[in-house]
Image (cartoon, rainbow, N blue to C red):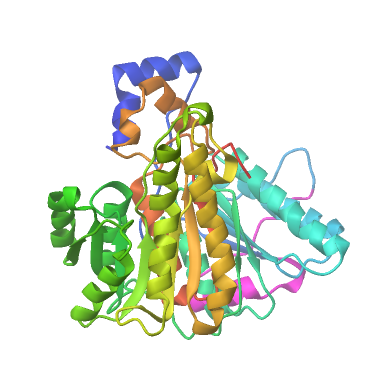
Amino acid sequence: MSALEKVFYSPVGQGVAKKAGLSEPPTLRRGRTWPQGAIVLAPLEGATLGKLTLKALGRAFEAPVVDTDTDQAPGYGSRIGALMVDATALTTLGQLEQVRAVLRPAMKGLERSGRIVILAAAPAGGWEQRALARALDGIDRTVGKELRGGATTNLVYVEPGVRPGDLASTLEFLLQGRSAFVDGQTWTVSASGTKATVSDKPLAGKTAVVTGAARGIGAAIARTLARDGAHLIVVDIPPAGEALAAVANEVGGTALHLDITAADAGHTLAAHIAERGHELYAVVHNAGITRDKMLANTDAARWASVLDVNLQAQMRINDVLLNPKTKGGLAKGGRLVGIASTSGLAGNKGQTNYAASKAGVAGLVQAMAPDLADRGITVNAVAPGFIETDMTARIPFVQREIFRRTNSLSQGGSPVDVAETIGYLLDPASAGVTGQVIRVCGQNLVGA
């Protein structure tokens, strides 16, 4: 039983939930697990990308049940595992009726932790085409709030020239349990020409650095990347030495005790990598702090410390690791991932400094991505919502329960949910995903 479930089933948790009229949170399907029921494909207006990508993944699919606009929605004979709507060929607003017609029967036909995935052409062209793309985004976000039983929906925009190989890792991630806490979100896949194929060990033989890895989300990231085959260099401050050593031993990696705000932190990290003869493939900038106060009570020191750790330190480290002359620097075709936050995207009372730093991370990856494209380096961020960690466990119970419940999945996320999304972004087959910020928040009900 998870920590969340233990709290919910405790006498206090049951009492609070009953008074608030709250139902039991669904158990989410996680890991490299596929839906149990059938995958249904709806290729609208003759679209073929979804079909070709499913075939590339070796997944069988069935035809959809289509609504005829009767009072009683038609249903499936048995619960389906997923519905993929390939809307990449739609060009007019009138064609949105086709989307409604294939979604309606699936709304009550999905198994628990089922999936809806919508593919659409990236916003481009004239007024109607751009309106159509945003209309699909509105559908996706609303469907996420109507689904039940841990089912999720997500929308993927595809740029011109995207092929099945560009899309395969994204579709695999969204259909598998790895995307358990990613719901109602939208991001873009571009053409990359990658020859990488999806694999259960996509990071085999590759070296990745994870900062802030001694505990919580950072430790979960290290474990997940190790599962996917990576050699890990885990980084944290010297006072976390014992916990960091335990993580390094668990994942078979090496530990580096380092204050990332030090002026020479980037050079120290590069030297550590070079001395061991590694080629650096990925850096996950996970280290971060909070120093929460209302802005009226935030002094310069409290402000500066959060900005330095959460944003400026990674910029300084990136400057060193991205220098082609740096031994131990990031290799061509490498990966950079930052940790943003829903607090940065939506704002959060008492966290002006934290929100500034995390919004800055989002802006940084979006700015860096086009500048590094010619080196094949992708730059992305994840934006966690309420994630169950030792830190959030110290929040008063009632406040914690409110945070848990204010998303479409009615629960807090697990550190592994953040880690799985990062693993997807690091996958060599995800070369077409760059400059994106993916919220891992269960469709938190605040923010865009």
Residue at x 70%, y 49% (from the top left corner)? 139
In the rendered view of the protein, which quadrant contains the N terminus? top left
Asked whether 77 or 167 is in front, the reply is 167
Q: 305 or 410, which lies in front?
A: 305
Quadrant location, the C terminus: top right
Give the quarter of the image for residue 24.
Answer: top left
Q: Which residues are magenta?
A: 43-68
Q: Is residue 318 above or below residue 299?
A: below
Residue 255, quarter of the rendered image = bottom left
Q: Position of residue 183 (x, y in %)?
A: 54, 48
Query: Magenta segment: does it hold 434?
Result: no
Q: Is residue 411 visible?
A: yes
118 or 391: which is nearer to us? 391
**Residue pictured at 13% horizontal, 61% vertical:** 249
The residue at the point 55 percent across, 43 percent down is 443
Residue 66 position in % (x across, y down): 71, 55
**Is 261 located above or below residue 111 in the figure?**
below
